Structures are given as C-alpha cells and as structure tokens.
Image (cartoon, rainbow, N blue to C red):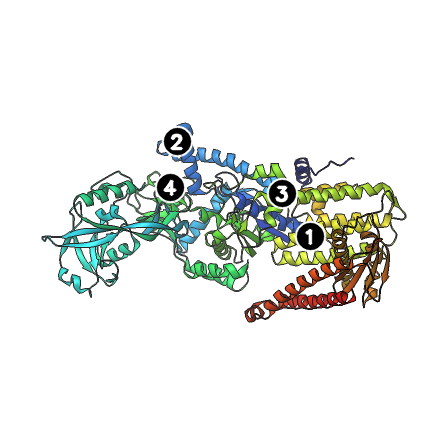
Amino acid sequence: MELSKNYLPAAAEEKWYQHWMDKGYFRSQPDDRQPFTVVIPPPNVTGVLHMGHTLNETVQDILVRHARMSGFNACWVPGSDHASIATEAKVVDMLKKEKGIDKSQLTRETFLQYAYEWKDKYGGIIYNQIKKLGCSCDWDRVTFTMDDHYYAAVIKVFIDLYQKGLIYRGARMINWDPAAKTALSDEEVEYREVEGRLFHIKYQLEGSTEYITIATGRPETIMGDSAICVNPTDERYSHLKGQYALVPLINRRIPIIFDEYVDKDFGTGCLKVTPAHDINDYNLGLKHNLEIIDTLNDDGTLSAAAQIYVGLDRFVARKKVVEELKEKGLLVKEETYPSKTGMSQRTNAVVEPRISTQWFVKMPELAKPALDAVVSGAVTIHPGDRFMATYKYWMENVKDWCISRQLWWGQRIPAFYAPDGTFEVANSAGEALAQFQAKNPAFAYSVNDLSQDEDCLDTWFSSWLWPIQVFKGITEPENADINYYYPTSVLVTGQDIIFFWVARMVMAGLEYKQVKPFSDVYFTGMVRDKQGRKMSKSLGNSPDLLELIKQFGADAVRFGIMISSPAGNDLLFDDSSCEQGRNFANKIWNALKLVKMWETRRKGDANASTKDNFAVQWFANRLAEAKASVEAAYKGFRLSEALKIIYSLVWDDFCSWYLEWIKPNFEQPIDAAVFQQTITFFEELMQLLHPFMPFVTEDLYHHLANRAEGDDLIIKQFSTPTATDGALLTAGDLAKEVITAIRDARNKHSIKPKDSIVLHIETSNEAAFGPIKSILAKQVNASDIYFAQAAVSGAIALVIQKDKFYLETETAMDPAAQKAQLEKDLAYYEGFLQSVDKKLSNERFVQHAKPEIIALERQKKDDAEAKIKAIGESLKAL
C-alpha cells in the first residue's frame, strides 16, 4: 500500500474511533484488575465545548489511556450537568426569540419539555465534540444530572440532611440575581473592580432647617431607609439623640440611632441604614428593631414600597433620583471611587442583597472532615503548593450554603405545605400527609390540599454527588459498580471550582460513603489567548474546537494544548501550537515512509543479535531512559513535561539521529536484524506517544506491520522500564555533539557534503571514541579518523568538550582564518564563563536554587574553563 505524501488525519480519526468503539475498548465492567476510575466534570448543556473543556478532556483521556495500557481496568464516565440558572436563561431566551413565548405563559411541565429538548440537542453536540477529540469514554455509562436515578438521589440526600438537622429553611440576607430572578450562593458571586460614584445627599432634620449629609453609592435605595446611624462618641451629632430625619424625595420620617458600628472618621460619620438592601444594615436593623422596606422587585425594578419611580429599572431609577436631588438642592456633590461590585457568575447581572426565605445547608459540620482529608494528604492536590492554601481558606471560613433557586429547571425541593403554612419534607405528597398526620392526628387537610415548594435546588447540590451517583451509590448503596469503582482515582478539573465542586464532593463522599471520592485532584490552568486574555465568547477569542480539528487534526489540537499546559498554570494558546502538532504528526509519517522504503532491502537474519551495533544499543538505552522519565512525570501529574520528553525522543533522538545512523547508503541493503529492531523501536515510540496523540499512533502502528485480530495499540500493555547503560548514553551524547560541531565547522568553511575529510582527534580518552568511530566517519564524511598527539598543520581546528579536533581537507586552511575563528570561539566561552560565575556568586541564587540546578551550573563552569584552556593551547600552536 502506497503511503500518502502527508498524514491525513480526518480519515484516520473516523476509522480508528469507530474501530475502538466496535471492539468495546472503552467499556468497563468490574473484574479482578485494579480499577482506574475517572468521572468527567460534567459540562453544562448550554452550548459547545470551549478550550478549557478541550484541555480538561484531553488531560483525562491521556490519564485514562495510560492507565488502560498499564494494566488497569480503566473506566471513564462521561456526562453533562443540567446547569439550572444558565440553561433556564438560555431556554427562556430561545422561547422568546424563536417562538414569541414568555415563560410566564407556560406551565412548569410545558417549560420542562422545552428544556429537555434543549438538553437533547446540546448534550448531543457536546458528546460529539468529545468523541471528535478522541476521548475514550465509556459511552454506555453516560449520566445526566436530571436522569431519573440521579434526580431520586438528590432528593434522597436532601431529605436525609434535613432529617439530620443539616438543612433548614429561613429568612436571611441572600444574593439575588435580578436577571435570572433567583437566589445565589456566596460562591456564585464574582466581585469585580469598577469605578463607582459616591453621592453626598442632604437629609433634613424633622422640625428644623438643619441638614445632615450622608454619602451613598446607591441613591436609588434611599426610599428604603429605616434610620440614620451615628457613633455614640461622635460629639458632632450628640445633640441629635431622640430626633428624626426625613428621607429625601419622599419625606418619610426615620429615627436617628447610635451604634459603635459606625466609623466616625469615615465620610461624614453618618450612615443611612437600609436593612432590606445591605447585609450590615440588615444586622443593624435586627439590633435596633428597624423596619425592613424592600424597594426592589425580583427583576431589579423599583417596587411600590419605593413610592416613586415604581417599575423603573434600578439603574434608570438611580439617574432619575440623582436628577431630582439636584433639582431640589439636596445633592451636595458627586465623586468617583474604586468599588467592588458583586456580579452573577451566570448572567453577569449586578447582584442585589435581599432578604428572602430560602433553604440552607449547615456547612461547618460537613466541612471539617473534608478539610482534614486534604490536609492529611488522603486527597492530594496537584499542584499542592498553589491550591492547598485556597482550599484551606474556603473550608475554614465556610458559610451556610443557600441551595434553593427560584427556577423550574432542576430537582424540585421536596417540601410540601399545608394551607396553614406548615410543611413537611418528604418524597411525595402522600408521604408528607402521613408525616403531618403522625405529628397531628387531627390534621384536617387531604393530599390535594398540599402544595409542593416551587423552587428547585442549586445545580451544585446535584453535582456534589457525581462520583457516587454515576455508579448509583446513593440510590443503590451496595451495588457491584459502586463497590468496585469508588473511590475514583483522579479528578481533573479547573481551579475556579475548587470550592463549588471539589470541596463539596469531598464532603458528600465522606458523608455518604465514609470514604474520600478520589485520591488525587489535578488542577488545569486557565486557557488564555496569546495576549494573555481569558478565552471567552464575549471577546470572540475562543476558537471553535471542531474547526481546529478540521484544520489541524484532533491529535494536533491535543498536542497543541498539552505542550504548553503545566499543571495549575495558565497557558497561552494560539493556532501555532496546533501547527506544531500537525508538523510533528507529519514528521512521524515521513519517518514511517523512510523505514518502509528499507523493507524490501533487508538482508540477513532478522533474528540475529544486534548487540554489536552501537546505534541500536544506544537507542535502546535512550528509549529506556525516556520511558522511566515519562513514568515519573505521570506519577507527578507533569503531563506537559512527559509530552516534551516524548517529543524530543521521537523528533531528535529517533528521527534526527538514530535513523540517520542506521540508514543504508544509496541503494545498499539494510541489516535485517537492525531493520526489525527499528520496527520494534518505532512501535514502542508510538505506544509511548499514544495517550497524547491516539489516532496517528494507532494508524502508524498498523502500517508498521500486519497485525493479528485484537492487536491494537490502544490496549497494548507497557513493558516495565529496564535499567540503562550510562556509558552507552554518554557515548551517544558525545557522538551527537561531535557530529554537530564538525558539521557546523564544515558549513563555516564551505566544505561541501560530498567532499571527504580526514579527522584527527587529540584526546586523553581515546577509548571513548571506539564505539562511535564508524558512526562519526559516516556522518561527517571522514575517509579516515586518526588520534593525533599534536596540532595538524593546515587543518581546521576546533574544541569539543575537552578534546581538540582537526579537520584535514584537500586544500590547506588559511592560518589567519583559523586563528580568527578560534579567537571568536574563545571570546564566546569567556563571556559564557563570566555569566555562569556571576550566577554562582549570587548568594540569593545559591541559597534558593535546587541542588541539582547549582550542580549543573558548576558543571557548565568546569566545561567552559576546559574549552578555554584547549582553545588557548590551539592558538599557541598556530
């Protein structure tokens, strides 16, 4: 079969993914092997995957494929999240734009039908993208957080926590999203630096012409003021005890109160108290029994309680209030100031503090074991030095979790209310009625009189059960899957949900399985564009994954995002890294074509020994060395480092050196045993690279030899890394350095490749060159190699490591040109030595650098000094 000029990814990707699926390689069932379990962080069913998902899915697939090839029973569970706030907003918007339907016109059941249609459409798109990327998920285990079994699990946990006293219902100051018209937890609010405006407003004292001035950033809330507060030690206002002031524009009478909470040195020393719209004001209101006046509707417009500008948006009303205050002479001044404004993560709306009756989870009791699990090392975070502190901070300062949402898309809260306002938490209205009757035999209502809570649960209240319930561990606690696959092996996720999801999964795992949900957490970094900006749809700087795959191929995209993604660190991504991946795939393809050209030129016994062939023995050791390094990188979750090791091994050591060293001369045969060993090396390289670039490696594996049924790379087991021969590796490094230096010297002196040279080597270790002598001769076109005792007159002189080399050509070299080149080399090494000395004389560097780094710098110093000495001696000999 003739090979195409370049590797063609599209055909290979379709062929091999379908082959893997047909063979059932992704499917997993409990057996006697050790499981390696990964659960996909479920993407929201709100659209397509972004580059953050691409990184996350690629990392997981690398770990899963590596585990599968290492003898584990790999199980990777895919799925998606219903994402209450985001999905409901998308569906509401779609209904309005495409069908002219407002949500308020629909029943809950009809709206949910539209939401499930949305889920089916976009869930399918997401799964298709994951497949296109090459992810080896167990597609028989796809889970959705609104599946019947999952829904039942969430309700079961709610009821259990309520019965344990860990869930309660109460009126609290919460975060309100006016766009989504729902409560938010504290963690769903992002605080952003904005330039605010501070308005200084005059409040008239009742029965007086005197005014006091109060500064506020939210003049639209003054209609909700319940008091003015000053510090009891502030002598400027001591005469105001027992007095009242009038709220500007509406002239409502409010008391002047005194509390040490007020900082008399900040602003005017007077604070307007608006209990319905600020948490600190709310606490003051409770302390002083102040009226709570909520001037905002749930959509952020002014309510009837505001008395003026009713129905106007809060920010429109702000402008109107300021204009009226100016007209009436009540606005003293305006000034700008830096402010932190709370924004909804899902809708980007400015969040409003609001008093509301909601459902909460008591967190401290659940958080303590989850904190201990990470601090003790039972759950290991990678990279721990960056994220351990963040995790500890969240868990040590945890607040009760507001879990109710004023939405329809989600698990509905299982609380049932009687007409008198009392309620019972139960699985059904029937069970609730039985509970009412058990507490009160005279309970007068029927099941038809009970109404279920309209709210649904926070999405995170379902996803914190993910590692357990994907195996039905809540609904069927002792089933075979949960007992085999749980706890999972590693969680791969983004650093931005360390508390939203990671910490809460640890809490749920310890509460419901008494075991941590995973052993390791690998945090990926944030994907940014080459300008350093976070990739987002709003900026239009996030590429389309399918377009990238179409342009470069899935392997190239995987390579591109992994080559620059050290664990936990943000990565700068652009198309050039995918282009590098495509070039790498083509490099391997061209190496395949070269090797296949030799197939018909084999001569000799393919089973003969190759122990005397330096190139074969060197590469065998180099491969073993790289395998050990790659395994160490996997264990430390340094996947980018592992890929770089493999990339260098394939591109440099195999393609650029090994294949050149064994390549037969024009139309000459190749030793059959060397050829067979080369095929074996190529197979092992493809195996090593497979987790990162699965399609091209599987394709090449099958091009390298005729395979028996079931002999597929995806399930080919890694061999145990063997010990390496340090002397062989050193000899190989010497050969590469000498060949490179001599080739450079030939180029500098315009010696054509076809022109042979005689090479003279002045060395104190002649034995080091024994194994590589024939390779040197071939690679630098040397007709003879001699070991000199002195300088060779008229030859090109150069220093490599501590040895001197003389390249004798047919035409003697000009001594002046020789001297000029040596002096140039001398100046370079003297400058290099100076920079190394400067680094080693820096006490801060020596104190803080790792020992191996300092040792490397000292080795550089020794090498530079040896080269300077050798060059000096060569200059004297001219």
According to the picture, the residue beneath numbered tag 3 turns out to be: 579
Q: Residues within 10 Å of mark 4 (few under 14, many from 20)?
A: many
Amino acid under disc 1: Ser
Q: Earlier in the sequence, mark 2 or mark 1?
A: 2
> Which residue bears the numbered disc 4?
180
For residue 488, side relative to residue 764 (left or right): left
Disc 3 to disc 2, how far (Cα)? 42 Å
Q: Residue furthest top?
A: 99
Q: Amino acid at mark 2?
A: Lys
Residue at the disc numbered 2: 96
Q: Residue at x 30, y 54 (%)?
A: 279
Quadrant including the C terminus: bottom right
Marks 4 and 3, the one that precedes in the sequence? 4
The N terminus sits in image quarter = top right
Label 3: few (<14), some or many (≥20) within 10 Å? some
Horizontal arrangement in the rendering, residue 145 relative to residue 686 (left or right)? left
Q: Which mark is residue 648?
A: 1
| Element type where label 3 sits in the image | helix
Label annotation for residue 363 = none
Q: Nearer the viewer, residue 475 or 769?
A: 769
Which of the two residues, 701 or 525, is positioned nearer the viewer here? Answer: 525
Q: Secondary structure at mark 4?
A: loop
